[in-house]
Amino acid sequence: MLAILAITTPIYLLIATGFVSLKTGYIARDVPKALGTFVLRICMPVMIAGAVNRPGAAALNWHFMAVYGGASLLLLLSAIVVMHKLRGNGIAASAMYALGMANSNSGFMGYPIAALIIGDAAFDILAWSMIVENMLVIPLALAVADAGAYPEERFHRAFFKAIKGLYKNPIFVGLAIGLVVRFSGLPIPEVIQKVIGYISATAPVVALFVVGGTVANFPIRSLSVETGMIAVGKLILHPALVLAGMWLFPMSDPVYMLGAALFASVPMLSVYPIFGQRYGIESITATTLVVTTTLSFFTVSALIWLMG
């Protein structure tokens, strides 16, 4: 277990550094947002483009995306029903609570953690998981929420509205550029490969710092049953369902099974409270982000230990 803590502790110390830096006023409150924009709009597209062009790896692994996406969708839809029918929340709130369970902070936490455990394979999973999240899980959750919040909004219109904006998404841009390079057979100059390497090494450190600073921007309010349910769904049910899917439909390379579980085990997106604000539940979503990020140190360490 000490060997596991030697891996996870530095990661969470970077998060703590961002948290303390902002809380003490050492950095301004808008610094995490600026650094997060750099990671999201510059680093992530470059890394996605590099991932789909990595020698020896498939550009798009439909098997992985089907299993990972299927498990995430199963959790998303089940959680919407539970939160609405059993807890009595509105459709919009239920969809946002479910999104907190079924969508991971893959770029800012999943990749930095997985890269230390499974190496270059994490680069591939970053691309495949973010395709699933940005092109399926998030648009579907937002469409359900909009259809529930605005009576005049039809689900199919809300879904296509979310999909229509994908061309502006940095992840989609990086994917499109990467696929064009991959299937055109264009060689990637050595200088560009070096740039991709520098960015791939820099992004995880900056991203983890941003997570800490972002969490520090959201104070903890009173804890609720929803906060506990979302935390359990995100940190336990999501990786468990992904592992079950990978066990039922195994991949040729078992390292992807561990990688998929690691990506599923990290907390939700750092912008989760902003999604919640759109539907008037920012207090719960902000509190849940802080609580889940804190608890993930223990649950992620336990998962790595259990999987050997």
Image (cartoon, grey):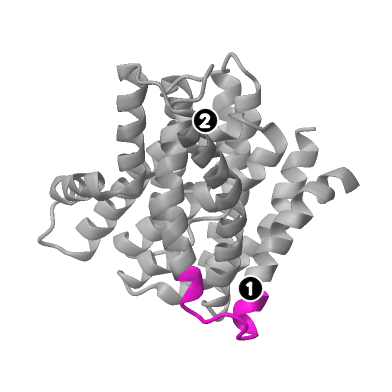
Residue at 42 percent of width and 26 percent of height: 188
Q: Which mark is residue 124?
A: 2
Q: Which residue is mark 1?
A: 19
Is residue 292 depicted above or below 299 in this figure? below
Q: Secondary structure at mark 2?
A: helix
Residue 92, position in %: x, y? Answer: 30, 62
Residue at 82 percent of width and 45 percent of height: 4
Q: Secondary structure at mark 1?
A: helix
- In the rendered image, residue 297 lying in the magenta stretch gets the answer no
Q: Which residue type carries mark 2? A: Asp
The magenta span reads: 19-33
Residue at 23 percent of width and 65 percent of height: 149
Q: Residue furthest left?
A: 152
Depth order, front residue of 237/139: 139
Q: Which residue type carries mark 1? A: Phe
Q: Quadrant of the N terminus?
A: top right
Is residue 73 visible to us here?
A: no
